[in-house]
Structures are given as structure tokens and as C-alpha cells.
Amino acid sequence: MTDLSVRIGKSTFKNPVFSASGTFGYGIEYSDFFDISRLGAVIVKGLSIEPVKGNPGPRIFETASGMVNAIGLQNIGVKNFVSEILPILRSLDATVIANVYGKMEEEYAAVAAILDDAEGVEGLELNISCPNVKKGGIVFGQDPIAASKVVQAVKRETDKTIIVKLSPNVSDITEIAGAVEEGGADGISLINTLLGMVIDLDRKKSILGNVMGGLSGPAIKPVALRMVYQVAQRVSVPVIGIGGIMNERDALEFMLAGATAIQVGTANFINPRISEEILDGIKAYFDREQIERVGDFTGTLKT
């Protein structure tokens, strides 16, 4: 039987299947469908220092082989998360990674400081890649110096495992990956959504209230695979693959390309049990192929 555990920074996760932030609510919404403690980690919605209402609607639109969203990081704020949501997640025995968002470097650090004292948060994922907000997010993710500084600022506030989520909306993603590794990141997750837009020809209007949004789903998988492969060659910290993973075969392709773990995103909107099914599929594949450890498979792509 394969040892499915994976290690990122100081943390050991029971398996490599994580939910992607922004597609899985706060995790508790999916507990009616399956036992979320089975997942390697539940990565919750992006948390800011104050509650955020998000962008005006419409905020989601289905496209060919994907979806464009412009939610705008709506969330209840980190303090409300700690007092109202985290106790429920602890009762469900979920392994929690908190996605962190800020408009300024100091806000990322402030949210991290609050979560550092929070029982039941295994690690933090810094969102420096959201394309749907006017301040913060992708502003940090497109500048190597700013990306490194925000990681350093967070590292000063917490000893928890730090993962940094990167944007594909850059000319050279390996440059940003190298910068956050030098800043102290324990792991790198990629990719976030590709900047896109959708138009209603009959009304001659943009469909999304925010005009532009982030494209996700199967349409972006080849881009994500390429970037995971490139970054895995560039850095020594673990890489987490995201982008159009709809089944276990997609997940295994990302692991072949160099991903230590994977995150399931848009597929959750189609099948709320898909993360569990992908986990079972990976386990069956490893058992069938007599692979003893996840690390024996990760990054073994033949080129």
C-alpha cells in the first residue's frame, strides 16, 4: 500500500489532494457531501483583515471548457473566521490551510499574526495572484521584489508553513517563483486564474460586473502543466499544481510534471465529491503501479 503522505515545510499532510481556495467555501459547506478530513488539506476562501463584500454581479460565467469569475475575494474577515468557522473545522477534524490576502504588505502580515495564534490552522497560503481586485493580489505577484518582501513580512509574524500562490499573468513565472523561495516560502502553488473577459453580443456589454475576471477549468490545464513543470525545475521547495484538474488522471499528470501535491478547483462546482473521488483514484493508481511513496512518482516525467 502506498504511503500517500507529503511534506511541505514543517507540515506533513496525509495525502496530496487539497481543495483550491475560492472554490470550496470555508470547507464546512462540503461536509454534507463527504468526510472532508480525508483530504490532505482544505484551503479556505481568501481571508483579509476586514470583511470584504466582493465585486458587483454577475460574478461567474461558464465558458467553453472553463469558467470566468470575478468574485473579488468576498470573505467574512480573519477574526470572524477564527471565532465562527475554525471551531467547526476543528470539530470536523479537517486539516486547514488559510488563504491570506491583503491590499498592502502590512495587511498580509497582520492577518498572518492573527492566524499564528489560531489553533487548527496548519499553514498559510499567500494569495499574491488574484486578478479580480484593484489593490493587492496580483500587484505583488507580478513584481519579484514585492513578492519576496511580502513573504518575508509574513515569515516575521508566524512559524506556520508558508505556501505562496502564483499568477500565470506574468512573462516569466520562474522569476517570481525564485523570488518567493528566496523570501522564505516553504512551498509554491500554481496557477491561479488567467485574466479574461466575456461579452454579451446582443446587449453589446461585458457580462461580468467587474468587466474582467479569472479563467479557470480544463481550458487552462495545458498552461498550468507547463508552468508547474518550469517552476519545479527552478525551485527546491515543493510545488503544488492547480489548473483544470477534473479527475485523477489530470492530477497524476501534474505530479509527473513535478507537483508534490495538487489542488482541485473548478471541478468542485460540477461534482462536490470530486476531490474525494480524485483521492481514491490516485490511491488506486499508485497501488496498481506498486509505487511505495508519492515522492517516487513526483517529477518523473520523461521528456
Image: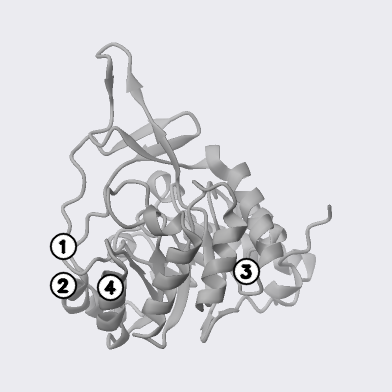
Q: Looking at the image, which residue is at 62% across and 52% down?
A: 227
Q: Hey, what amino acid is under mark 4?
A: Glu
Q: Secondary structure at mark 1?
A: loop
Relative depth, front residue between 205 and 260: 205
Dot 1 corresponds to which residue?
51
Dot 2 corresponds to which residue?
80
Seen from this angle, which residue lies furthest right? 303
Decide: is 237 above or below 19.
below
**Dot label at residue 106:** 4
- Tell which circle, 1 or 4, labels the residue nearer the N-terminal end: 1
Is residue 257 something one can see in this rendering? yes
The residues bearing labels 3 and 2 have C-alpha atoms spaced at a distance of 32 Å
Relative depth, front residue between 147 and 245: 147
Decide: is 296 above or below 212.
below
- Tell which circle, 3 or 2, labels the residue nearer the N-terminal end: 2
- Tell which circle, 2 or 4, labels the residue nearer the N-terminal end: 2
Q: Looking at the image, which residue is at 52% across and 87% down?
A: 10
**Dot label at residue 260:** 3
Q: Nearer the viewer, mark 1 or mark 4?
A: 4
Q: Secondary structure at mark 2?
A: helix
Q: Looking at the image, which residue is at 52% across and 63% down?
A: 189
The residues bearing labels 3 and 4 have C-alpha atoms spaced at a distance of 30 Å
Q: Residues within 10 Å of mark 2 (few under 14, many from 20)?
A: some
Q: Hey, what amino acid is under mark 2?
A: Asn
The answer to whether the residue labelled 2 contacts the one labelled 1, judged by CB atoms less than 8 Å apart, is yes
Is residue 35 something one can see in this rendering? no
Q: Nearer the viewer, mark 2 or mark 1?
A: 1
Q: Nearer the viewer, mark 2 or mark 4?
A: 4
